[in-house]
């Protein structure tokens, strides 16, 4: 999706099981949901 | 985030209303308990520097509801212009402001009035006159073309039914060579169309 709109040099950071221990945990586990950080660049 | 996805068929205005109601609760009653983590424990889980969090007003921290740490992808530089898409109570907005300093500029955008009020109050409490918080939507940012060195966002794009439109808006407001530092949700299993179309699963 990022590349679809023109972003380049996409860098992935760490993924966190951000719903672990929350009331949303079971729904999150069903789809293996993670919080993630990403950086993407608009070409100069 | 890099794969083509089928858009949801949820009604955009209904979804916005439900999400805004949910996050009004996070703003006004942060101790109420939600289907996701909030506040300082969440910030610690996501690896935010405790010293940075300590500098923020407690009313800002208590309503934090992100899913990642955009600053883990690189600090912002003094003098940079930053747009925070879906700034909420201003947690990331105020951290960004401290990093870019008074020679920079930070524009937060959110659709929930209660969150906008908290973000403005937090900026005022810290005397950050170069922070501006505007009402708006991720799919139609109230920001001019090509003004931002950096766009940050945290747990917001996943709440938009048409993510490509939201991404195009981020791209539009960035300067050439600008960067998008985002914390958001990814799913590693295919989400069936009926789940994508279930509005209750969106707003938690």
Image: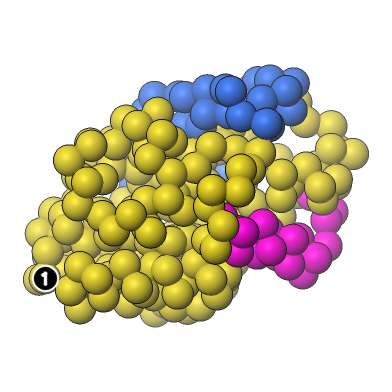
Colour chain A appears in: blue
Picture layout, residue B170 above or below residue B64: below
> Could one spot residue B61 in this view of the protein?
yes
| Circle 1 Cα neighbour tier, 10 Å, few/some/many (<14 / 14–19 / ≥20) | some
Q: Which quadrant of the view contains residue B10?
A: bottom right
**Disc 1 designates what residue?**
B102
Q: Quadrant of the N terminus of chain B?
A: top right
Helix, strand or loop at mark 1: loop
List x then y, in percent, for residue B3.
Answer: 61, 35
Picture layout, residue B192 above or below residue B89: above
Q: Nearer the viewer, residue B18 or B197?
A: B18
Colour chain B appears in: yellow
> Residue at (52%, 23%) from the top-left corner?
A17
- Magenta-tinted stretch: B8-26
Output the chain of dot 1. B
> Residue at (18%, 74%) from the top-left corner?
B127
């Amino acid at each position: 999706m990022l590349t679809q709109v023109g972003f380049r040099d996409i860098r992935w950071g760490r993924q966190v099981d951000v719903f672990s221990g929350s009331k949303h945990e079971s729904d999150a586990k069903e789809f293996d949901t993670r919080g993630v950080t990403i950086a993407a660049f608009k070409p100069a | 985030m890099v794969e083509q996805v089928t858009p949801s068929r949820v009604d955009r205005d209904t979804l916005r209303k439900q999400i805004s109601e949910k996050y009004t609760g996070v703003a006004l009653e942060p101790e109420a308990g939600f289907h996701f983590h909030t506040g300082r424990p969440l910030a610690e889980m996501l690896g935010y520097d405790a010293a940075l969090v300590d500098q923020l007003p407690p009313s800002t921290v208590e309503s934090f509801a992100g899913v990642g740490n955009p600053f883990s992808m690189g600090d912002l530089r003094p003098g940079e212009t930053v747009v925070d898409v879906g700034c909420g109570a201003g947690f990331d907005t105020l951290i960004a402001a401290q990093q870019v300093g008074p020679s920079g500029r930070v524009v937060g955008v959110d659709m929930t009035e209660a969150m906008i009020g908290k973000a403005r109050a937090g900026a005022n409490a810290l005397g950050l006159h170069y922070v501006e918080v505007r009402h708006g939507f991720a799919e139609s940012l109230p920001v001019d073309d090509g003004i931002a060195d950096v766009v940050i966002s945290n747990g917001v794009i996943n709440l938009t039914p048409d993510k490509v439109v939201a991404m195009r808006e981020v791209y539009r407001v960035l300067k050439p060579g600008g960067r998008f530092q985002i914390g958001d949700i990814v799913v590693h299993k295919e989400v069936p169309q009926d789940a994508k179309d279930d509005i209750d699963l969106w707003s938690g």
